[in-house]
Image: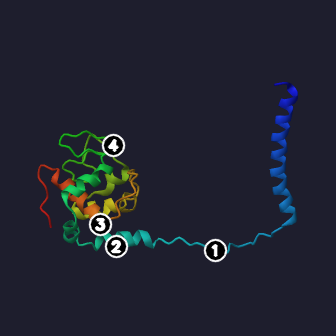
Amino acid sequence: MDSFEVNKIIAAVLVVFLVIFGIGKFSDLIFHVDKPNISAYKVEASTETTSQAADSVQTVDISALLAMGNVDHGKSVFKKCSACHSVKKDGKNKIGPALYNVLGRNVAALSDYKYSKALMAYGKSWTFGEMNGFLIKPQVHIKGTKMAFAGLKKEKDRASVILFMNQNSDNPLPLP
């Protein structure tokens, strides 16, 4: 290939670039539109969703919720959690703390795991209700937690995971 052909290729690329760029500039000249000072669609964010989520956790009948779940379904749903958590006896901490014996123990109780400041200051224990609220959306239930999980929206999934975690314990809590 000689230099004349290379020049033609480069010129073709430049012409295409100039035509595309020029069409945009030319259309701006022909179709001048004044932008309004205020937006036609104003979206206001409300804080009701956070308070509604907290209220719905408090009003949940935990025994009815747990009746929806089963351990086998919880084992399959827990696979989402197993990337970060271990539920085996003497299981090691991963990205998240080991969850064997989690129900009934205090939040942030494992000494060999570095919890977020929010979990350290929470001061409650993992009851069925606390775990349900946390699994809905961890960042809403305990603000400042470093657990980056979208949550389990389906009640059956949450109930099943809670039952599965309760089963993986030396002393499972009695069901309400």
Q: Earlier in the sequence, mark 3 or mark 4?
A: 4
Which residue does the image show at 34% across and 73% down from the upper left? 55
Q: Quadrant of the N terminus?
A: top right
| Disc sitting over residue 133 in the figure | none
The answer to whether the residues at label 3 and label 4 have Cβ atoms under 8 Å apart is no
Q: Tell me the distance, in whole angstroms, between the alpha carbons under discs 3 and 4.
A: 30 Å
| Disc sitting over residue 55 in the figure | 2
Q: Which residue is mark 4?
A: 114
Tell me the amino acid under the disc marked 3.
Answer: Glu
Find numbered disc 2 in the image and state the secondary structure of the residue it sits on: helix
Q: Earlier in the sequence, mark 2 or mark 4?
A: 2
The way the protein has been coloured in the rendering is: rainbow
- Vertical arrangement, residue 47 with respect to residue 92, above or below: below
**Image position of 90 (left or right of 45):** left
Q: Tell me the distance, in whole angstroms, between the alpha carbons under discs 1 and 4.
A: 45 Å
Which one is in front in this view, the residue at disc 2 or the one at disc 4?
2
Q: Earlier in the sequence, mark 3 or mark 1?
A: 1
Q: Tell me the distance, in whole angstroms, between the alpha carbons under discs 3 and 1.
A: 35 Å
Residue 112 placement: quadrant: top left
Q: Which residue is mark 3?
A: 155
Q: Which residue is mark 1?
A: 41
The answer to whether the residues at label 1 and label 4 have Cβ atoms under 8 Å apart is no
Which one is in front in this view, the residue at disc 1 or the one at disc 4?
1
Tell me the amino acid under the disc marked 1.
Answer: Tyr
Which one is in front in this view, the residue at disc 3 or the one at disc 4?
3
